[in-house]
Image (cartoon, rainbow, N blue to C red):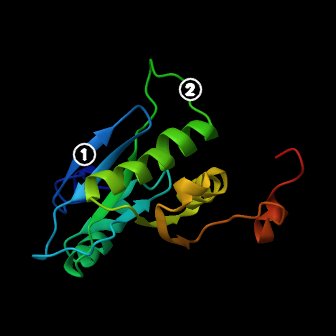
Amino acid sequence: SSDMQAFTVGVNLGTTAGAVVFQNEIFQLIQYQPLTPKVLAVPLLIVPPCVNKFYAFDLNEQKSFVKYLLEQGHNVFMVSWRNPHPGTTSHGWDDYVFDGVHKAVELACEVGGSAKVNLMAWCIGGALSVSALSVMTPAEKKRIASATFLTTLVDYSDHGDVGIFVDGPQ
C-alpha cells in the first residue's frame, strides 16, 4: 500500500510558490511567483490533462518543470482543473474549451500584461487546447504567440496499438 501522507499537494507535492488569480466552476488559474528579477514579456500558459492536474509538472523541489521555467525567467500560468463535486452542473467539452482554455488564455494575457501568450499543453489538455485553437476567431488567435503540444492525440481516426483492446462500440 502507498503512504498517502507522502503525496500532499502544497506540502510535498506541487510546492512551487504561486497564487490562484482566477477561478470558476471548471478551473483555477495559478500564476507562479517569479524566481528572476525580470520575466520574459510573453507569459507561458500550461494546460494539463484533467486527470494529472497541475502538479504533474511540479512534483517536488528536485523534480519541478515549473521551477525550471521560472528559473529561466518565464512568467508561468497553469490551469488547475477543478474536480466535479455534488451540486455542480454537468459540463461538456464546449464548456472546457470556452470557459476553460479560452478563458485561461484571456486571463494569462490580461494578468501577465501581454497581448500574447505561449501555450503549452499535453494529453487531454492538449486535445482541449487544439479544439480551442480551432474555434478561435482571427482576433483571438492573435493572442497565441506559440503552441506546443506534448503527448497529444489530435487524430482519433487511428487508435494505434490500443485498437486491439477496443472495438467499435467502445
Q: Quadrant of the N terminus?
A: bottom left
Q: Secondary structure at mark 1?
A: strand
The x and y percentages for residue 108 are 34, 55
The x and y percentages for residue 161 are 78, 71
39 left or right of 140? left
159 left or right of 128? right
Q: CA distance from mark 2 to mark 1?
A: 24 Å
Q: Is residue 38 above or below residue 17?
A: below
The x and y percentages for residue 165 are 80, 59
Amino acid type, label 2: Ser
> Residue 129 lies in what quarter of the image?
bottom right
Residue at left offset 25%, top offset 52%: 9
Q: Rate crowding at label 1 as few (under 14), some (14 to 19) or many (20 or more) other CA atoms within 10 Å.
A: some
The x and y percentages for residue 147 are 52, 70
Q: Give the residue pinned by disc 1.
A: 21
Q: Nearer the viewer, residue 63 or 33?
A: 33
Q: Nearer the viewer, residue 115 or 57?
A: 115
Which is more foreground, mark 2 or mark 1? 1
Q: Is residue 133 above or below residue 80?
A: below
Q: Nearer the viewer, residue 113 or 107?
A: 113
82 left or right of 73? right
Residue at left offset 55%, top offset 59%: 141
Q: Which mark is residue 90?
A: 2
Residue at left offset 25%, top offset 45%: 21
> Residue 25 lies in what quarter of the image?
top left
- Can residue 85 be seen here? yes
Q: Residue furthest bottom?
A: 72
Amino acid type, label 1: Val
